[in-house]
Image: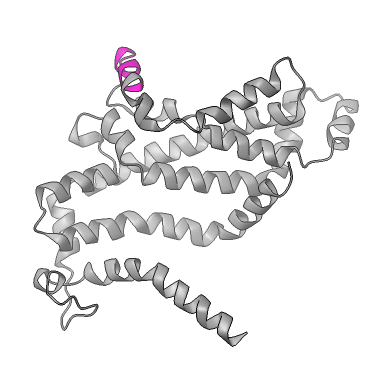
Amino acid sequence: MIMKRIILVLVLLIVAFPFLWLLISSFKFEKDIISYPPQIFADKYTLNNYLKVWSTIPLLDYIKNTVIFAGGVVITSVFFDSLAGYAFARMEFKGKNLLFYFVLLTMMIPFQVFMIPLFLEVNVLGLLDSYPGMIIPRMTTAFGIYMMRSFFVTLPKDLEEAARIDGLNEFQIFLKIMLPLSKPSMISLAIFTLMNSWNDLLYPLIMTTSAKMRTLPSGLALFSGQNISFYGPVMAGTVISMLPLLIIYIFAQKYFVQGTAMSGMKE
């Protein structure tokens, strides 16, 4: 038992070490960050890195854009993925299995393959460099549909039959019965979607052309490219971008673990 705990602690330290290094280095002076041999701790620390990143780039605009983009994607994606997952799991219609396999097939296509056609489509629709242009193509995902379907197939059919006897139609059954029961899985999917959207670099970079529409990852990437010699502010900006996800995960981890287990155990 003691040996297992020692191994777990070592694994935890290995996994957490890069994040601890990032956090500590964000408070270091530039000379301490680039010193050789590298040192984890420094003699003196400073807040200038955080002050510089706030004064150099429009960080508040980047945060606002990221919140709108990631929040819009989470809300729409979770709802539409739940609808599609419910339809594939509980409803019978012609070509259901074939259509579901086609949805799964899209998970195997890298984004780099269709990013140019997607850019051209958004541009033709006049949605380039706008919030709808970033949110609409992400309103549903194959992974989300698969995850919600995996949960809905585990629910007993007696729930639907009782609801139909009470006079509820299919959408009312989904909205009033199935959706409340799927809360853990929906929160898990929301966390996955939020992490993916919040940390996405390439997609927002393609869909935006002006600096005022940049999200945090794309804005920090451009900042680090222009200020490659200033590692402290770049690390400070990275820490700022990580904090919201960390806080959300801390408060939602119970539902995250529960939803992940419930959506993946049965098929």
Does the rendering let one see residue 255? yes
> Residue 79's x, y, as percent?
58, 33
Residue 217 position (above or below residue 17): above
Left/right placement of residue 12 relative to residue 99 reads left
What main secondary structure does the magenta stretch of the protein show? helix
Residue 92 position (above or below residue 193): above
- Figure quadrant of residue 105: top right
| Viewer-side residue, 31 vs 110 | 110
| Viewer-side residue, 240 vs 25 | 25
Query: What scheme was used to colour the molecule?
Result: one colour
Residue at 37% in and 27% down: 113
Q: Say whether residue 124 is magenta.
A: yes
- Figure quadrant of residue 208: top left
* Farthest top residue in view: 124
Quarter of the image where the N terminus is located: bottom right
Residue at 58% in and 80% down: 4
- Figure quadrant of residue 46: bottom left
Left/right placement of residue 241 relative to residue 3 reads left
Does the rendering let one see residue 127? no
Residue at 10% in and 47% down: 226
| Residue interval drawn in magenta | 118-126
> Residue 184's x, y, as percent?
65, 49
> Residue 115's x, y, as percent?
34, 26
Residue at 26% in and 72% down: 24
Quarter of the image where the C terminus is located: top right
